[in-house]
Amino acid sequence: MGTPELPVPDGLVLRPFRGVRFAVEDPAKVTSPPYDLISDADVEALLDSHPNNVVRLILPCSTPSDSSSTAHHASEPPAPPAHRLAATSPTTDPSPTADNPSAPSTPPHNTTDTIPPTTDDTPATHQLTEPGAPPHFRPDASSPTGEVPVEARYAEAGRTLKAWLAEGMLVPDEVPALYVYEQSGPSVLQRGLIGDVGLADPAQRIILPHEDVMPGPVADRLALMSTTQANLEPIFLLYEGGSGTATALVDEVAAKRRPLVTAHTEDGLTHRLWAITDPAEIAAINADLHHRQALIADGHHRYATYRVLQRQEHAAAREPGSSTPSTSRPDTSSPGEGHNSAGESSKADTNAGNLSQTPTDPDNTGEARTPAGDPSKAHASTDEPGQAQTNAGSPGAGRAGPWDFGLALLVDSAAYPPDLKAIHRVIPGLPLSEATERARSFWQVRYYDDLASGLAALDSVPEPAFLLAGEGGSRLLTDPDPVRLARAMPPDHSDRWNSLNTSILTEFVLPVVWGMRDDDRTVRIVHHDTDAAARLAVRTGGTAVILRPLAIEDVLAVAAGGERVPRKSTSFGPKPRTGLVLRTFAID
């Protein structure tokens, strides 16, 4: 069956929705960090804080003994988290959460520590500093004995969500709204709008991705969204607001109106939420946003999942005799076509956002399809602010459904510049001494006795430069051999892309200097924390690669040019807190 033509927004659209919020005395206790930044210890702490913490939904807590039971009520103790199950070594379990589901079972550098495969949205720093911790999810339904099957975990999440709605733990707002969301704290102030963003093909250049996606996390989030029929966490979008109407109204609401929610979380931030329900204000916001572009700062896999789910639901609705959305078991097959054997996107896919091309798979989800008409001929409805319609004349044309939108936080980057941090690498089983010896043929190497001295030196030299850390101190790599570097960098990428430190790491250091692939079975990811990366390197007999953060202007320029930076190149913050407002399709 072919993929039906889909609704196409003709600009950046943020539709109001009826938010679903927790009815608790202290809303902070039921919130959590984003799902992919939560460690085992974090889950314990979150559930100790409140048995109805949203982590029960985003990381379903089922075990073989309770997966068939009904959802737990507020008075019942929480079920044991799924991640407490026995870990499976990556040397014997090719987890589909890795970059490449078909990667060989033994990584080039083995280690006696069991390092979990990680999620690909932005893997948890804490998770990766806890060797031996099992993965939070495993999208393969044929999981090994002793692990909770994926269907059971997501069925539990769906039952829990329904139970909490039925008993009043979760309560929908009376009318649709756009929500002003503020995060504030020491040296932190970020405000934006939470709403239903119209799903645009990257080729339309309305919503720009800057990273490729991998099939495992998309399959995982697709299973959760399909089963719960909900968006439980907003993605994070940035746009250049130019002191426009939307930004002015956001600031006015935050300054003059009483918030719906105020939550003080353990990270020292205060979160506040307001609802904008006035149709005139919502229309003014969308008029201001309509001609703008948004960059996906965080949530590439969830945005790709939104679009896969959209196609899945439209296809199900077109099946003969079908008059209702699909409620069958979600398709969690690996949507990984378009990736090479190393799990990386092919060079042809890198420019999928370029309008001069006709991408078969702009989200790297493996589903070839025909572009849904000319975006310039799509029209937004005028009788409901922010409501997109399908293309005129398309099969089943009419008002768009809930799957044609996704929950998103939209922030004006000019008014509230984001915090862009580096993401570091650890290569288990590659000792610092060996990594250094191999690098000496390609780079100038400086030796330092400790991490602090090496970090100070890294800050003082021009790019490209990397700090290696592990047993025995740290080593600074500078001044690469220009001929070998130029030969390694792909000619079909722009000079700006080829100058990024993450591009040089991916294309030159890892494959040429050290002879390995950049995938989750070989390279571990640690967010921000240089000390944690160094400790993990020591524990695993490996080497940490410390990077400086990319420049925001470089990320924006690469995305605007239709390219995508290498995986795990950026970590934008502050990320939205999960659980302040949820979106369910039935209530939306």
Image: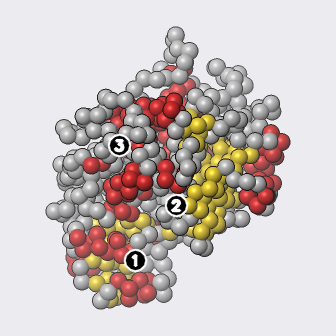
User: Would you identify the image quadrant in which residue 458 lies?
Assistant: bottom left
**Horizontal side of residue 377 vs 225, given as left or right:** right
Residue at position x 60%, y 58% in the image: 271
Residue at position x 22%, y 74% in the image: 431
Q: Is residue 314 visible?
A: yes
Alpha carbons under labels 2 and 3: distance apart: 23 Å
Q: Nearer the viewer, residue 70 or 345?
A: 70
Q: Specify the label residue 292 is tagged with.
A: none
Q: Earlier in the sequence, mark 2 or mark 3?
A: 3
Asked if labels 3 and 2 touch by Cβ distance under 8 angstroms, the answer is: no
Q: Which structural element holds mark 3?
A: loop
Q: Is residue 104 visible?
A: no
Q: Is residue 30 above or below residue 112?
A: above
Q: Earlier in the sequence, mark 1 or mark 2?
A: 2
- Residue 102 location, x and y as percent? 28, 44
Residue at position x 55%, y 25% in the image: 314
Q: Nearer the viewer, mark 3 or mark 1?
A: 3
Q: Nearer the viewer, mark 1 or mark 2?
A: 2
- Residue 103 location, x and y as percent? 27, 49
Q: Nearer the viewer, mark 2 or mark 3?
A: 3
Q: Which structural element holds mark 1?
A: strand
Q: In which quadrant is the C terminus drawn?
A: top right
**Residue ID for mark 3:** 77
Alpha carbons under labels 1 and 2: distance apart: 34 Å
**Residue ID for mark 2:** 265
**Residue ID for mark 1:** 466
Q: Nearer the viewer, residue 578 or 527?
A: 578
Residue at position x 61%, y 36% in the image: 172
**Residue extending furthest top?**
321
- Residue 301 location, x and y as percent? 48, 47
Question: As shown in the figure, which amino acid type bears the numbered disc 1?
Answer: Phe
Q: Earlier in the sequence, mark 3 or mark 1?
A: 3
